[in-house]
Image: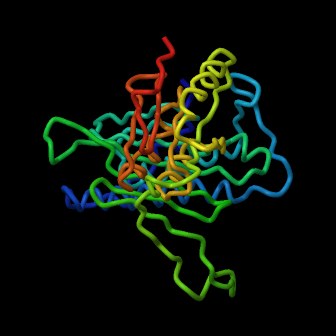
Amino acid sequence: MNQHPKHLHSANAGVSAVPLEGADLVAQLLGIAREAAAAGAAVLAERGRSRVAADTKTAAGDWVTDYDRRAEVAVRDVIAAARPDDSITGEEYGRTVPQLPSGYRWSIDPLDGTANFVRGIVYYCTSVAVYGPDHGAPGTGRWLAAAINAPALGSEYYAAAGSGAWLAEPHHGVRAGGQLVGEPRPVMRLHGGDREEAGRLLATGFGYDADRRQFQVGALLGLMPGFANVRRLGSAALDLCLVADGTLDAYAEYGTQEFDWAAGALIAEEAGIPVLRPVGEPGWQAAGHFDFTALPSAE
């Protein structure tokens, strides 16, 4: 596990003096998720036009950049300031567990779509989600709130358990004095696409390991009946969001990790889309109106 920079654990500011419950708590968690995702996205928005330097992690193309690391620090700082007793799991700095855990756990991907980011392809984002006790079903847990902020697209997707999924679209105002003025940023509730859409599109992704990639490609051929074509955009989080908003009709990928799908799966689910979360790792992550039982086993 990686070492955690000391300032990842800082700050108690913003903690409510009165414990919240139920819908109020979920609303608070959503606000924190959105603020944290925006903080990470603000780091990514610093990217210039030239190609970004990257280090290789596990294989060619599996990159990490200084932006990944700085964005994760920014996300963690927001969460730690508001919820110092919550656990955090992030892609770059592993898991942080406080001395007295609250029972809530954040799963963050500071830069989903790093290869896109390095090469200047706009499909990348910061993804933040929180899992905690389900007060409607004591003794169980569920994903409670999620936010995905895609700075190059100017889009923010977010959802709270039982409250629907939403898209804040790019601001179309004019800039004056460094601020956007004019029409408010449009926000729309997401309901997925048309189940009977002609020319249905399936999204997927491929791993860096050659054997896994061979399995993924073979599995894709078995999934294609019922779909007109396939798209590979390079961000699992945004694939799930694009299913939620109806741009894509379905998504299926084998071998993703929790921080890849945690936020996007809740957003798709709250948009009324059937969702399959992996049981253990590796496994299938999927969303859309299609037969999940058709997903083959890698065993």
Residue 2 lies left or right of residue 274; in this view the side is: right
Comparing 265 with 90, the one in front is: 265
- Can you say whether 173 is above or below 88 in the image? below
**What color scheme is it?**
rainbow
Above or below residue 11? Residue 282 is above
Q: How far from the left and from the top, in percent, is residue 73?
A: 56, 46
| Residue 11 rendering spot, x and y as whole percentages | 43, 52
Looking at the image, the residue that sits furthest to the top is 299
Residue furthest to the right: 50
Note whether 16 is above or below 108 in the view shown.
below
Residue 181 is situated, as x and y percent measured from the top left of the image, at 60, 86
186 versus 13 height, above or below? below
Is 16 on the left or on the right of 45, as rendered?
left
Q: Position of residue 2 (x, y in %)?
A: 57, 27
Residue lying at 42% horizontally and 44% vertically, measured from the top left: 289
Looking at the rendering, which quadrant does residue 221 occupy? top right
Residue at 50% across, 57% down: 246
Q: Residue at x 44, y 27 (%)?
A: 294
Image-based side of 230 in relation to 299, left or right:
right
Residue at 65% x, 61% y: name it. Answer: 153
